[in-house]
Image (spheres, rainbow, N blue to C red):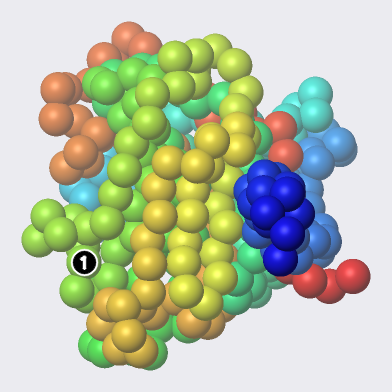
């Protein structure tokens, strides 16, 4: 090869490699959403309620009510989940826990929830997912898995957390996979909390900023039960093992989790 041609090819090669780049990711197609456009009760075709006041495994203090407007309603284009300090069924607080179980259940996808968080000390809002079927291991938590898209506690304002829990990796053993990111105006502005989930990874984002990844380890369900349908859960807890570490500001209530929209996408459907 002539020396000049060799030098020219050597000069051009780095530019050619740089332009190649990674393969394009598969497109996302929306398959389910709630834009909260009709005032009143949350859409019963999309949402149901988990109901009760038994502490929910975390020594929480609220009673989750069933279809009660004071605790869950659509208003001015938003879903409002509101916790009140009031006696109810032997509990000191009321709130709501909305679920898509049986009305929105998915294996893999992208999940976007745009929300503004409460700020009272003692509040514990969460945007998360639980399995629709509980038949792995002993049929209880955490054998069947948990995906936490966003958690926030009022005693640690503007710091949001993402986690996955399994039999092998869970908070009760301090072995959960988790990460946190600071969102300075999380309680005064809307932000988009997102999960991307495929057969090998779970990734979390705030406003498309990627800050957490949980990866599959082998094929053992004890480390990776995330191979079947999960549903969404939106709630505001009060107190609990984590939420009440620094006490509860009883004068801060009522407190709201305000949700602008929920959107679910699947990959490669076009």
Q: Residues within 10 Å of mark 1 (few under 14, many from 20)?
A: many
Q: Which residue is mark 1?
A: 169
Specify whether 20 is left or right of 217.
right
The residue most toward the left is: 173
Q: Is residue 226 left or right of residue 46?
A: left
Determine the residue located farthest toward the front in the rendered image. 2
Viewer can see residue 38: yes
Q: Position of residue 207 (x, y in %)?
A: 60, 32
* Residue 250 position (above or below residue 229): above
Q: In which image quadrant can residue 88 be found? A: top left
Q: Measuring from the top left, give residue 170's x and y in whole percent.
A: 21, 63
Asked whether residue 140 is in view, the answer is no
- Seen from the viewer's position, the closer of residues 24 and 106 is 24
Which quarter of the rendered picture does the C terminus lie within? bottom right
Q: For the point 38% across and 31% down, which residue is it?
A: 181
- Residue at left offset 38%, top offset 79%: 225
Q: Tell me the SS state at disc 1.
A: loop
- Residue situated in front as seen by the camera: 207 or 65: 207
Q: Residue furthest right?
A: 270
Name the residue: 60% across, 28% down.
191
């Amino acid at each position: 090869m002539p020396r000049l041609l060799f030098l020219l090819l050597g000069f051009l090669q780095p530019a050619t490699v740089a332009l190649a780049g990674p393969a394009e990711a598969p497109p996302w197609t929306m398959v389910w959403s709630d834009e909260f456009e009709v005032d009143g009760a949350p859409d019963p075709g999309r949402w149901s309620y988990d109901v009760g006041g038994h502490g929910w495994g975390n020594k929480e203090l609220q009673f989750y009510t069933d279809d009660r407007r004071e605790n869950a309603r659509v208003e001015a284009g938003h879903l409002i989940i509101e916790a009140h300090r009031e006696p109810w069924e032997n509990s000191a607080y009321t709130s709501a826990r909305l679920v898509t179980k049986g009305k929105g259940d998915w294996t893999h996808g992208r999940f976007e929830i745009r929300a503004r968080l409460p700020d009272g000390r003692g509040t514990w809002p969460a945007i998360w997912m639980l399995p629709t079927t509980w038949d792995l291991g002993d049929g209880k938590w955490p054998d069947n898995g948990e995906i936490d898209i966003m958690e926030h506690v009022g005693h640690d304002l503007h710091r949001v957390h993402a986690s996955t829990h399994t039999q092998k990796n869970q908070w009760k053993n301090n072995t959960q996979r988790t990460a946190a990111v600071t969102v300075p105006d999380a309680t005064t502005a809307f932000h988009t909390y997102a999960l991307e989930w495929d057969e090998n990874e779970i990734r979390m984002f705030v406003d498309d900023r990627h800050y957490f990844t949980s990866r599959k380890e082998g094929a053992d369900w004890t480390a990776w039960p995330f191979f079947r349908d999960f549903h969404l859960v939106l709630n505001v807890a009060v107190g609990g093992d984590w939420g009440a570490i620094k006490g509860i500001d009883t004068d801060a209530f009522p407190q709201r989790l305000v949700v602008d929209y929920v959107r679910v996408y699947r990959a490669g459907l076009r």
